[in-house]
Image: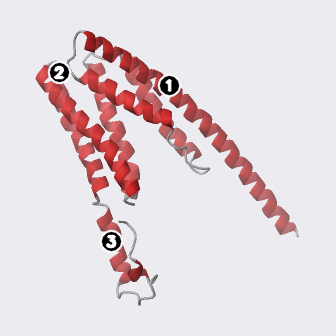
């Protein structure tokens, strides 16, 4: 847990522990190494290994592609667990807030770029997906002073579709499975665009509401000062 025990903060009526500030700092420092953050770190470390496996032996060896798929699958699974653990067991840290989305985009971006470089995936698909992710990240910063855009159900479906489609492209599939992965990727691209437009709509509404509330608060403050 990231919080300081009540006995250390005086909340239970006990006398503060000598050197309490140092103790609190030690607790906060130790919280960086919780299981959620460790899973995020593992995912970050998997990125270069995944790239080497995917491009191994020229990038077209089925065995190397299978190993790359395994690394990608591990990264996707840890993505599911680290956020859940952090929220469930109060393990949210500033490091996790920054590193988790970076790790998500790093593994997905590496996979898309490598697949396009190998000629397995059109560059425009990679551009649409990565452009959307970068745009939404910038959009969140644009409205962060007014609130947070929550993750939608469509966004979660998009993430699942992208992970499934990219995983299928990482494998050296042929025949009907190769055709199937094309349609799964098509669904992922559609969800990427649709959910991206929905996020833009939410951001505009949130910013307008925030600006209106700010103007109202300023007007009320002016009225109070004039009294």
Q: CA distance from mark 3 to mark 1?
A: 43 Å
- Label 1 vs label 2, nearer the camera: 1
Marks 1 and 2 sit apart, C-alpha to C-alpha, by 29 Å
Residue 2: percent from the left, percent from the top?
37, 66
**Disc 3 on helix, strand or loop?**
helix
Q: Which secondary structure lies at badge 2?
A: helix
Q: To which residue does mark 2 refer?
A: 59
Q: How is the image coloured?
A: secondary structure
In the rendered image, the vertical position of residue 71 relative to residue 164, given as above or below: below
Residue extending farthest top: 175
Measured from the top left, where is residue 64 in percent x and y?
13, 26
Q: Nearer the viewer, mark 3 or mark 2?
A: 3
Q: Could you tell me if residue 47 is visible in this image?
A: no
From the viewer's perspective, tell me whether residue 2 is left or right of residue 193. Answer: left
Q: How many marks?
A: 3
Which label was assigned to residue 27?
3
- Left or right, 27 with respect to 209, comes to left
Query: Label 1: few (<14), some or many (≥20) within 10 Å?
Result: some
Instruction: Please rate how many residues cluster around mark 3, counting C-alpha atoms within 10 Å: few if below 14, some from 14 to 19, many from 20.
Output: some
- Residue at image point 28% right, 44% down: 78
Q: Position of residue 6 (x, y in %)?
A: 42, 79
At 47% from the left and 25% from the top, the residue drawn is 191
What residue is at 43 percent from the left and 31 percent from the top?
A: 157
Q: Nearer the viewer, residue 209 or 114?
A: 209
Mark 1 or mark 3, which is nearer the start of the sequence?
3
Quadrant of the rendered image containing residue 27: bottom left
Query: Disc number at residue 193?
Result: 1
Res 132 label: none
| Dot 1 or dot 2, earlier in sequence | 2
Q: Out of 55 and 169, give the one closest to the viewer.
A: 169
């Amino acid at each position: 847990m990231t919080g300081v025990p009540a006995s250390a903060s005086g909340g239970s009526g006990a006398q503060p522990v000598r050197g309490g500030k140092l103790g609190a700092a030690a607790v906060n420092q130790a919280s960086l190494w919780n299981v959620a953050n460790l899973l995020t770190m593992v995912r970050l470390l998997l990125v270069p290994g995944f790239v080497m496996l995917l491009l191994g032996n020229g990038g077209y060896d089925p065995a190397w592609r299978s190993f790359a798929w395994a690394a990608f699958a591990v990264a996707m699974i840890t993505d599911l667990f680290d956020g859940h653990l952090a929220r469930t067991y109060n393990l949210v840290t500033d490091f996790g807030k920054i590193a988790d989305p970076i790790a998500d985009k790093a593994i997905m971006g590496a996979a898309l770029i490598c697949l396009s470089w190998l000629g397995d995936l059109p560059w425009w698909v990679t551009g649409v997906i990565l452009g959307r992710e970068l745009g939404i990240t910038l959009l969140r910063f644009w409205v962060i002073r007014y609130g947070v855009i929550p993750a939608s159900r469509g966004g979660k479906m998009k993430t699942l579709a992208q992970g499934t489609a990219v995983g299928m492209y990482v494998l050296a599939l042929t025949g009907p499975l190769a055709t199937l992965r094309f349609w799964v990727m098509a669904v992922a691209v559609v969800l990427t665009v649709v959910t991206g437009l929905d996020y833009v709509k939410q951001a505009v509404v949130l910013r307008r509401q925030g600006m209106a509330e700010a103007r109202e608060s300023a007007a009320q403050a002016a009225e109070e000062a004039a009294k």
